[in-house]
Image (spheres, rainbow, N blue to C red):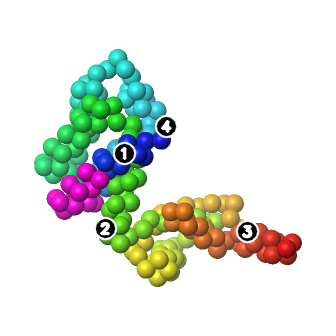
Amino acid sequence: MEYITIARPYAKAIFYLAKKTNSLDDWNSFLDILSSTFSDTSVASLIKNRTINYSDKASIIINFFDFTSILNNDAKLYFSNMINVLAYYNRLLCIKDIYFLYKQYMNLELNCIDALVRVPFGINSNQKDDIINCLSKKFDKKVSAVFEVDEFLLGGFLVKVGDFVLDASISGNLASLSTKIIL
């Protein structure tokens, strides 16, 4: 089910709260962990269980997480309130979309973009820095990159930033060349 429309007002509210309290990174970490946890099938089953009332679901989630190192006392109160509101309105499964939108708002605020870089084999930190610097220059923004090894790439790399894809792989160049030859 698509929850992005439902998630938007929650993500905006959380973003403005995080911005107001200078805790953008804290909320980013918290929402990332929460989103990952809610992706687990057993947690999703708990959330979907109609025999458990909303306050019990919220209590289970709040008690399950110990965010002493991530959130301060004020943020813990906001966290509890957020979980209670999402549980009350049966919106707990929107967390992934809330996190996705929050991340977009945060990146826009910080003039930053997220990039997924696929490489055919592990690369060292200098090579990663070179790729990140090139991407930063190309997009004129700070780049936060996640590197993945994709053994199907013959060489080079593949970058995905939102809808934009930069295919600097050998297989991508060969495909492009074959298309040009055929035409």
Report crowding for label 4: few under 14, some 14 to 19, many 20 or more residues within 10 A (C-alpha): few
Residue wearing tag 4? 1
Q: Can you tell which mark lies on residue 109?
A: 2
Q: Which residue is mark 1?
A: 7
Q: CA distance from mark 1 to mark 2?
A: 19 Å
Report the magenta stretch's main SS. helix
Query: Quarter-wise, where is residue 79 in the image?
Result: top left
The magenta span reads 12-25
- Identify the mark at residue 171; answer none if there is no mark: 3
Identified at 23% across, 30% down, the residue is 59
SS under mark 1: helix
Looking at the rendered image, the quarter that the C terminus falls into is bottom right
Disc nearer the start of the sequence (1/2): 1
Most extreme residue toward the left is 73
Q: Where residue 106 sits: x, y (%)?
A: 32, 62
Who's the residue at 18% across and 45% down the image? 78
Q: Which callout, 3 or 1, points to the residue nearer the camera?
A: 1
- The one nearer the camera, 32 or 97, is 97
Name above or below for residue 65 compared with residue 58. Answer: below
Q: Amino acid at mark 1?
A: Ala
Which residue occupies 55% across, 71% down? Answer: 123
Q: Is residue 170 visible?
A: yes
Image quadrant of residue 111? Answer: bottom left
Q: Position of residue 29 (x, y in %)?
A: 31, 54
| Amino acid under disc 2 | Glu
Inter-mark Cα distance, 3 to 1? 38 Å
